Image: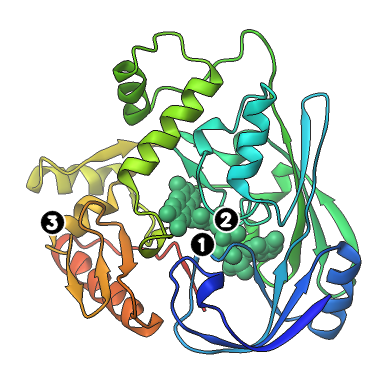
Amino acid sequence: MHTAHNVDLAPHTTFGVRALCDTLVTVRSTQELAEALESYPEARILGGGSNILCTSDVHGPVIHLRLMGVTKTDTLVTAQAGESWHGLVTWCVERGLGGLENLALIPGTVGAAPMQNIGAYGVEQDACCAGVTVMDRRTRELIRLLPTDCAFGYRTSRFKQEWRNRYVITEVQYRLSNAPDYHVHTEYRDVAEELAARHCSQPSLRDVYEAVVAIRQRKLPDPASIGNAGSFFKNPVVLASQAAALRDVHPQMPTYPQSDGTVKIAAAWLIDQCGWKGYREHDAGVHDRQALVLVNHGTAVGAEILDLANRIQQSVVERFGIPLETEVNVW
Ligand SMILES: Cc1cc2nc3c(=O)[nH]c(=O)nc-3n(C[C@H](O)[C@H](O)[C@H](O)COP(=O)(O)OP(=O)(O)OC[C@H]3O[C@@H](n4cnc5c(N)ncnc54)[C@H](O)[C@@H]3O)c2cc1C
């Protein structure tokens, strides 16, 4: 276990905003995690920092999870929380194990994936999740949870709700497929178009993986060149009647009917309609190609980015009557 004081979290988060952390404890084993939690049961948990915006200095301890290792038994893959998510996806694709390929290139760690049930291009991690091992902050006991315990939903889970301060995720298991008739997910329009452009009519899971990587490299800002945390807001989900009323007034509004009868609306479209795409004030801004992504052009502080987010939310409510929920964790 390594403890450091007055550490700038800028290099530890993809927004890259300056925030001094009192105490940063790096743990590399469950034993070290148990020791750290004994001293700091309320500590914040830091993975890859790709879904966090620090709006001021961080008072109180932060535990940086660096538990590493990936193993496989047949098609059951077990990955430790500190492993790179994209590294795990690549590892699985290289071994012909299908299920996670649509989630390639999502930044961050394995341990954070169940938190908001990461998803992209028509697939969410719960489609293959077989179990989540957690450490209880108070008892330091390791507990194996089933996916049904976790209440996974669209960018949410119990870990983001009532279990927020109860458990630390230490490892995640995925049941993947190496069956010859494994069905890749190409229903999402961007994926289908990319595969068609590559003249790939019978895509393998590697083809889908490569298509997703290419789409993401083209469309999403790389945090290595411009600070961001991906989508800042969730796509709002409304009742079918509200969506129909909105479409009467805004016929071009992109809407996606859900299996439970609700309708998802593209938050990026709402933000774009309010004129925010490409907006910049000092170094805080909205990406010029992806209105859902707030960016740090260099020296923005977290409070400026949060203030911009608040103004975007306010303008979307005023224009469309829809509250946008923040996806990024604000510290
Ligand atoms: C360019 C870009 C693109 C992105 N695209 C997507 C996308 O397509 N789909 C998507 O879903 N997300 C996307 N994201 C968001 C982000 O990558 C994911 O949410 C990712 O899972 C965060 O992982 P992390 O390790 O960086 O978590 P962190 O940012 O370190 O932490 C996020 C939250 O989880 C908590 N946490 C982290 N690890 C643990 C743990 N082991 N136990 C308990 N709590 C923990 C933290 O305390 C914090 O509240 C994107 C981000 C970026 C920068």
Q: Could you tell me the amino acid type at mark 3? A: Gln
Check disc 3 and report the residue beneath it: 273
Q: Quadrant of residue 251?
A: top left
Mark 2 to mark 1 CA distance (whole Å): 6 Å
Is the C-beta of the residue carrying label 1 under 8 Å from the nearest atom of ligand 1?
Answer: yes
Quadrant assignment for ligand 1: bottom right
Mark 1 to mark 3 CA distance (whole Å): 27 Å
Q: Is residue 262 visible?
A: no
Q: Earlier in the sequence, mark 2 or mark 3?
A: 2
Secondary structure found at label 2: loop
Q: Position of residue 62 (x, y in %)?
A: 68, 79
Q: Earlier in the sequence, mark 2 or mark 1?
A: 1
In the drawing, does residue 67 fall left or right of residue 87? right
Q: Determine contact: label 2, label 3, CB under 8 Å.
A: no
Q: Earlier in the sequence, mark 1 or mark 3?
A: 1
Q: Position of residue 308 (x, y in %)?
A: 27, 76
Q: Where is residue 29 in the image (x, y as percent from the top left)?
A: 86, 63
Q: Eyeballing the image, is 301 above or below 149? A: below
Q: Eyeballing the image, is 61 above or below 312? A: below
Q: Which residue is at a point 35% across and 78% down the rendered structure image?
A: 306
Label 1: few (<14), some (14–19) or many (≥20) C-alpha neighbours in 10 Å = many
Check disc 1 and report the residue beneath it: 50
Q: Which residue is at a point 52% across and 69% down the rendered structure image?
A: 13
Q: Could you tell me the amino acid type at mark 1? A: Ser
Is the C-beta of the residue carrying label 2 under 8 Å from the nearest atom of ligand 1?
Answer: yes
Q: Quadrant of the N terminus?
A: bottom right
Q: Determine contact: label 2, label 1, CB under 8 Å.
A: yes
Label 3: few (<14), some (14–19) or many (≥20) C-alpha neighbours in 10 Å = some
Q: Could you tell me the amino acid type at mark 2? A: Gly
Check disc 2 and report the residue beneath it: 108
Mark 2 to mark 3 CA distance (whole Å): 30 Å
